[in-house]
């Protein structure tokens, strides 16, 4: 009973800190995931541009692809915590001033996520039949128009599970930003523990934020799975139009 009393005491006294941390965690994770997806889509469009017949343009394309590959390898091959320290203190070294903490956290998560999204988008584009590109080009579309109107709408449906997974990962990985002082959920726990050092309080605070992280990830996962089902649509139908098969008729989904 003493343990639960201590838990409720912590919640009652420090709930504002915990809610503030939760808000910043979701803000950084959400914007970072959306921005990372945008980065991935841009690099995907660039990577799939047909090779130009102009020699100078081909050189520019190769340089662009090399830079994208370096970006992906660096940010996928190093921990986000190290990236945060290098970017935050590197900026301070170059400008003699530090970045604002929340924008810095969003920027770090965005470019880290962008490296993973680049590969996710690349895999999604590869999964789409080449005939889709050819059909778009035959209609007079250029590469950008084909990507926007034909490929990306199909791509988004295909990569949604991977994007959802990245969002969940970002919710958890924002905790590493405490190394530069971003006031996310884990950082708020350290502030609370600055005034409470008994073992019950230490365990209680970390148990509370553990439950909060689990609640966030569980809720987001279920909502995104619901969205996936909506985009996938009903499987309970048959193709109509056959003049030889009397059973070839539209079957309304059960419950409608």
Image: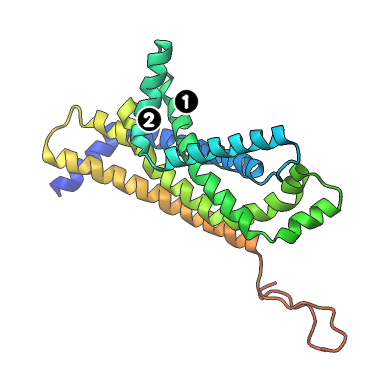
Q: Identify the residue at image location x=32%, y=31%.
A: 178
Please state the horizontal and vertical placement of residue 186, each as a whole percent of the image.
Answer: 31, 36
Depicted 166 relative to depicted 114: above or below: below
Q: Identify the residue at image location x=46%, y=35%.
A: 28
Residue toward you, 104 or 194: 104
Q: Report the side of 204 relative to 140 (left or right).
A: left
Q: Identify the residue at image location x=56%, y=59%.
A: 226
Mark number for residue 219?
none
Disc 2 crowd, CA 10 A, few/some/many (<14, 14-19, 20+): many
| First in sequence: mark 2 vs mark 1 | 2
The residue mark sitting in front, 2 or 1, is 2
Please state the horizontal and vertical placement of residue 234, each as a whole percent of the image.
Answer: 66, 69
Any part of residue 239 in sight: yes
Label 2 sits on residue: 84
Q: Report the side of 206 relative to 253 (left or right).
A: left
Q: Identify the residue at image location x=33%, y=26%.
A: 180
| Element assignment for label 2 | helix
Picture quadrant where residue 143 is located: top right
Residue toward you, 82 or 175: 82
Label 1 sits on residue: 103
Cα distance between the residues tagged 2 and 1: 12 Å
Residue farthest to the top, as pictured: 96
Any part of residue 183 in sight: no
Depicted 249 relative to depicted 92: above or below: below
Q: Report the side of 2 relative to 97 (left or right).
A: left
| Element assignment for label 1 | helix
Residue farthest to the front, as pictured: 55
Disc 1 crowd, CA 10 A, few/some/many (<14, 14-19, 20+): few
């Amino acid at each position: 009973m003493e343990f639960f009393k201590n838990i409720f005491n912590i919640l009652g006294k420090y709930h504002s800190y915990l809610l503030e941390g939760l808000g910043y965690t979701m803000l950084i994770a959400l914007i970072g995931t959306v921005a990372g997806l945008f980065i991935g889509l841009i690099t995907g469009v660039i990577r799939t541009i047909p090779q130009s017949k102009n020699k100078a343009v081909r050189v520019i394309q190769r340089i662009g692809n090399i830079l994208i590959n370096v970006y992906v390898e660096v940010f996928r091959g190093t921990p986000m915590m190290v990236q945060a320290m290098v970017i935050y203190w590197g900026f301070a070294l170059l400008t003699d001033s530090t970045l604002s903490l929340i924008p810095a956290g969003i920027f770090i998560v965005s470019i880290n996520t962008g490296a993973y999204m680049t590969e996710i988008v690349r895999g999604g584009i590869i999964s789409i039949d080449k005939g889709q590109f050819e059909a778009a080009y035959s209609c007079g579309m250029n590469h950008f128009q084909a990507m926007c109107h034909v490929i990306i709408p199909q791509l988004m449906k295909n990569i949604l599970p991977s994007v959802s997974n990245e969002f969940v990962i970002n919710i958890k990985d924002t905790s590493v930003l405490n190394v530069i002082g971003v006031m996310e959920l884990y950082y708020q726990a350290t502030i609370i523990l600055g005034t409470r050092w008994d073992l019950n309080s230490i365990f209680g605070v970390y148990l509370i934020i553990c439950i909060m992280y689990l609640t966030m990830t569980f809720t987001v996962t279920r909502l995104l799975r619901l969205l996936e089902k909506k985009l996938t649509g009903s499987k309970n139908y048959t193709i109509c139009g056959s003049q030889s098969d009397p059973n070839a008729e539209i079957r309304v989904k059960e419950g409608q």
